Image (tube, rainbow, N blue to C red):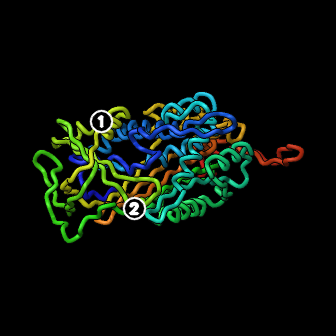
């Protein structure tokens, strides 16, 4: 489901940039002592940003998304899959770590996510920003205590037991209600019908929500209907906001770069960074999706008076990511060869789905954005017994094994 109010061509809205989560990875290093080790707090953020660029390119290249808008939360996906990785071993773990660009050192990884989550949930009177993780476990399934403890201690993922076996539909609704509550009802039905069944053993969820106002808000009375070029010979009419204020701005021969800050008081600074190609294709903007190049662009921003024309837009997007993530380099987690033995001590589990939904509304006052990710983990597929050809059957006394009746069916309608 996508509500298309702007085209993917012409404007590339990179992200909500959070200090400490900056997409360009230019946040200064700070260190925290964890278990006697010096932990670089931005190591997870830098990996998350690399994953963001990789996933953007992969989604943009997929035929299913040709000409579509894209919007997703790399941090939501990374968080849910990092908790999954905590239970992975061998090749399965190596592939997840590589695709997400996670620190190989588990102490760095865990401390990095804990530090970032704490910062996102610090709270502010100027904006709303929060993230939450949760585990939803089959009530009869014996997960390893150390896995549950790691998820709870480092990722804040408390466990709720559900009856997936006897009530998969009700369990799905419970998880979806939690997601709705954590995202102010902006993300609904994260897990679609059929995503949970009686073989589901665990669901790992992340939700993230942001609502902030521009430092310099647009005057709604100045918003007018104007054309937006979606291609060389195609335009659409959109509500275009008008502003004239001091913004960090720079341009190159092929690109204009604008940073629009959100009101923050003395709290964590947030802003929207926009890459606008001078041509009507996204080529110049997409070529800048590299940590070093983007850092250079941001360092070149200079505060100056800028006349801004920016479209209002609302976008809903949803993705089922197994095939995308497999193509990016982590196929094993989705097969019978998966090793999630760190969760339960067996090789019976594998990932059956990675569902992601995202929402963003950009208007004169500011921005509201939300996203959620659900990683569904199930057991081996149930064997299929279809008696649609001749068979032999026996009626036995179970204790002794004595055969009391015996026969065969060649034609169920015969005599």
Residue 247 location (% of width, % of height): 27, 52
Looking at the rendering, which quadrant does residue 170 occupy? Answer: bottom right
Q: In the image, what residue occupies the spot 54% across and 64% down?
A: 177
Mark 1 or 2: the one toward you = 2
Q: Marks 1/2: CA distance?
A: 26 Å
Q: In the image, what residue occupies the spot 10% across and 48% down?
A: 233
Residue 144 visible in image: yes
Q: Mark 1 or mark 2, which has the lower sequence index?
A: 2
Residue closest to the eye, 22 or 345:
22
Q: In which quadrant of the rendered image does the N terminus lie?
A: bottom left
Residue 232 location (% of width, % of height): 12, 45
Residue 68 visible in image: no
Residue 303 location (% of width, % of height): 27, 49
Disc 1 and disc 2 in contact, CB within 8 angstroms: no
Q: What label does residue 288 carry, if any?
A: 1
Task: Find disc 2 in the rendering and name its residue.
Answer: 212
């Amino acid at each position: 489901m996508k509500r298309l109010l702007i085209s993917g061509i012409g404007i590339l809205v990179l992200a909500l940039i959070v200090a400490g989560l900056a997409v360009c990875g230019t946040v200064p290093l700070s260190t925290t002592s964890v278990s006697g080790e010096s932990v670089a707090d931005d190591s997870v953020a830098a990996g998350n940003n690399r994953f963001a660029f990789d996933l953007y390119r992969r989604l943009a290249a997929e035929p299913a998304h040709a000409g579509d808008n894209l919007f997703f939360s790399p941090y939501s996906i990374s968080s849910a899959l990092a908790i999954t990785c905590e239970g992975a071993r061998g090749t399965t773990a190596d592939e997840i770590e590589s695709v997400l660009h996670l620190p190989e050192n588990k102490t760095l990884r865990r401390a990095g996510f804990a530090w970032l989550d704490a910062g996102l949930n610090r709270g502010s009177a100027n904006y709303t920003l929060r993230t939450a993780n949760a585990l939803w476990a089959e009530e009869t399934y014996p997960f390893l205590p150390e896995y549950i403890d790691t998820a709870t201690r480092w990722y804040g993922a408390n466990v709720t037991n559900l009856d997936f076996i006897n009530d998969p539909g009700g369990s799905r609704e419970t998880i979806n209600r939690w997601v709705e509550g954590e995202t102010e009802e902006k993300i609904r039905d994260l897990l679609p019908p059929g995503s949970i069944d009686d073989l589901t053993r665990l669901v790992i969820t992340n939700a993230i929500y942001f609502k902030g106002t521009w430092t310099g808000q647009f005057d709604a009375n100045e918003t007018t209907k104007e054309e937006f070029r979606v291609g060389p010979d195609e335009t659409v009419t959109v509500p275009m906001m008008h502003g004239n204020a001091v913004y960090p701005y720079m341009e190159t021969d092929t690109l204009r770069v604008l940073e629009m800050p959100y009101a923050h008081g003395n709290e964590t600074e947030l802003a929207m960074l926009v890459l606008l190609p001078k041509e009507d294709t996204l080529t110049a903007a997409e070529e800048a999706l590299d940590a070093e190049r983007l850092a250079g662009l941001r360092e070149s921003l200079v505060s100056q008076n800028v006349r801004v024309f920016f479209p209002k837009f609302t976008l809903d997007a949803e993705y089922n990511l197994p095939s995308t993530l497999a193509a990016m380099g982590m196929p094993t987690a989705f097969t019978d060869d998966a090793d999630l033995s760190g969760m339960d001590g067996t090789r019976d589990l594998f990932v059956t789905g990675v569902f992601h939904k995202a929402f963003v509304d950009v208007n004169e006052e500011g921005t509201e954005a939300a996203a959620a990710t659900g990683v569904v983990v199930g057991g081996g597929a149930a064997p299929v017994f279809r008696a649609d050809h001749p068979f032999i059957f026996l009626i036995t006394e179970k204790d002794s094994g004595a055969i009391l009746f015996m026969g065969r069916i060649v034609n169920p309608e015969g005599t």
